[in-house]
Amino acid sequence: MRYAAFISYSHGADIHRADRVRRALHAFAKPWNSLRALRVFLDNAALSADPALWNTVEQALEESEHLILFASPEAARSPWVDKEVKWWRRGPRARKLLLVVTGGDLQWDHARGDFDRARSTCLPPSLYGFFEAEPRWVDLRWMGEDHPGDLRDPRFRACIADLAAPLHGRPKDELLGEDVSQRRRFRRFRRGMLAGMTALAVIASVTAVYAFLQRNTARHQARIATARQLAATALNLSGDDLEAASLLALQGYHVARTPETLSALYQMTVKSPHLVKFVHSDAKVTALALTPSARYAAAGTEEGSVTVWTADGAHQIGHLSVSGGVTGVTFSHDGRLLAAGTESGEVAVLDLNSHGVRRLSGGTESVSQLQFRPRDHVLATADSSGELRLYGPDGRDPVSAVATGSGPADLAFRGDGTEIAVIHLIGSELYDSALRKVKEWAEPIYPGDAHFPVVSSSGNCFGYAKYDFLLLYSVDGLGRSDVGRTADCGAQPSLPSREITSLAVSDSNKVAVGTSKGLTLALSQPSEGDDGSADDKVSVEELPGVKEPSVLTFSPGAGDRLASANGNTVALWDLGRAGLTMHHHNVTVQDSTEAVSPPSLTAGPGGAIALDYDGDEYTLSVMTPEGMVQGRQNDSVYYAVVFSPDGDRVYAVSSNNRVDTWVKAPGALKRVATHKVIPVTDTRLTDVAARRDGRVVALRSDGSTVLIDPSAEGDPPRVEDSGIYDYQKDRQGDLSEDGALLAVESERSLAHSKTSHVDLLELPTRHRMRRIGLGGALSALAVSARTHSLFTVIDANVLQSWDTRTGRLRWQSDGAGYAGLAIDPSGHWIATVSGDGTVWFWDSATGGRLASVDLPFAAGSHATTLGTGWQSSIVFSDDGRQLWSATEGGQLLSWDMTTDAWIKGLCDRVSRQLSPAERSRYLTSVSGNYRACAASDG
């Protein structure tokens, strides 16, 4: 027989007991070198998913020598157990039936020679009248469902021996002895095996260590390759799916930190700086709305749900369910109420203060337009049949209604809100507050053939796109000879040649166009042409990072915010936002000089920044986390400024060969000392550094240096002049942060312009440590004693890193800007500036070029012709966590330069994890164990 026994039981009562008895029968008296003592069938362990279940059970019964019945009240009521017992009674081994009582009562009636039906509660009906004499049965009613089935339990062992004896065909006592013998043999075998394994372990350990090292190397290489692949995929996706790209860049960085993953991570943070956040609805978005102020954003879906978030997308603050797909949503002027219209004709108003919902009565036609009156909560709606309705602030029924005769393309309150304009394909009308028609214009505005209608959030601006041009009109200008076309609605930019998927206009001068390539923003600025006529200038900006939008809307009024949607993903934009890494500090840098020169900028201890911004009255300013203080200095421009090592003083070198010392006084900067440096023909002071010994080093444009003791007083001041080179020409030079090292073009560079050399000099002795040949013409240089580094840009393109201790080239990389060069004091980053204002960041250890940011264009300054970079200074903070920039005619800005800040910014923007489909598509066993945003649940 295939099985020694078949266990029949109730799944509801004995599934755990049956499994433990089966396992114990397998192990009891098992030969030490066998898998099991005998084989027992248990349906829960032996059956696979078989549609012909009874046929399989019947076959197992045929192949079993014994039937073990677990008797219980549940088994007595089980049709399956009864069916198995009936089959067994009819079979050839009917008398080989063993009883195990797990519950209920079992009483034998000696007078009748059968079990007592009245008192026995655990037998299936088919067993009554089967036994000719009282059978012996095993009592397991004491065994709970949580019993482990351990054969070391004497009581359980005795019960198993009772069952195993007939299955083995041997007496119980003999079987117990056999079990003991087999266990002893197994222990002896185990001891022998352990001895042999110990001998082999020494050999295996050596092999294992080698294999472990090889495995770790392979795993490390696999992580690097996987991380690089994720970084490359992120960059490929970033143009039209910045959300997924950001998550993949984060995933790649967590897998392995490489120059590629670091670059991808940073590029995601600077990509699409106006994009604030991605939020997700529960279905495809069909309507969007923003409040006039930066308060709320709402999205309606084709499934009849409306979700409301805070303007930054950080919190969901409301939800509304309506019948039918949402065709429009709009906020009241104060942002308190949200109205939603559907294709079924329902209009519902959500109060975002009380979260109460008011459902308005109306028609059954699809709602095409909704607008709140600007000064209160009166709501106007229009449906596809042309029915115009006006609802009061509180009622459910319309206070007025009128049939306009045509489904409107635009609906807007005009002027002070006492008039309502309705614009449709065949003309336009004007209604008063009682919906009485007061004026009508029969001239159609929209063309009769293919066009793309567009309406601003408030309805004040409307028009259409056709082919590659856009025509806009103003509701306030209706009835004028030019049919209401006004500059207030923006210029009419040429549209992309691609098919338009969505279009939005603001109430002022902005147009957003969605195409298969993403999102484009056009901004018009009214100006006057050469002949005195109006000549609007249009600037076009790509807003990368989103798939083709199907819905777009601006915030009412200035239109400084934008919302776009693709599928159930909504992107929220702030058009005045600087980006995830850039911060404005409300400091305007004036541009009053005729010469093009970057403002002086330096960083000091504790996050302090000193800036000379060339104003008419205040020139030197120090900004700390506590605020800004300024000093009066009207007679010169500072070419360079530096903090003392303790940060208490600021030293500045001026255009008139003077070194000034400033200290912070309550609410202002105070100049406490001035040292006049003896002028040298055709030279000027270009740099300054504060030494640890309290003295100050100033650098002249010819490469000579001046050592000053700021504490000295009297006449003449104590100034030590180092002398000058033989060549009376300007040289590029830079002082280290501690004033102990000078890097300067050598006289050989001046004689041979194609191949430059740099001298490294110890100060104040001016002992030349070494001369370095750069292999090209020098464009820019910077030196750091703290990191023992000299960085040079040669041939206006190649960035080089040199070790100042050995004079050896560490690395060089192409693509550097040469209008400015900054060294991170912490040794992580290098930044270069191109003339057009592009700032590239570099990994100072490897030379990997990470990513770039663009300094904002400084309108009205010299940057209009020469480029922002030539008028900008950049400097890293003392701890390297920020990069600061100042642009004449522009602003003081800072950028975060820590991976923690980048990761937080990206996770705040995407606010989700990779979806299962994305994980399956992009991740592998190497990268799948990481979470892109570990603190976010998505």
Image (cartoon, grey):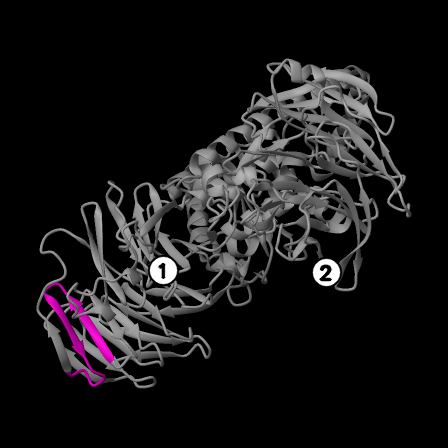
Q: Secondary structure at mark 1?
A: strand
The amino acid on which the numbered mark 1 sits, given as a three-letter code, is Phe
In this view of the protein, can residue 672 be seen by the observer?
yes
Please tell me whether the stretch drawn in magenta is mainly helix, strand or loop: strand
**Left or right, 215 with reference to 239:** right
Is residue 47 visible in the rendered image? The answer is no
Q: Give whichever of discs 2 and 1 has the lower sequence position.
A: 1
Q: Specify whether residue 431 is painted magenta.
A: yes
Residue 477 is left or right of residue 240, and the answer is left
Residue 333, how many percent across, how many down?
A: 38, 74
Question: What residue is rendered at 22% in x and 62% in y?
Answer: 485
Label ID, residue 626: 2
- Residue 290: x and y, percent? 39, 64
Dividing the picture into quadrants, the one containing residue 931 is top right
Residue 336 image point, x, y percent:
42, 76
According to the picture, the residue beneath numbered tag 1 turns out to be 554
The magenta-colored residue range is 419-436
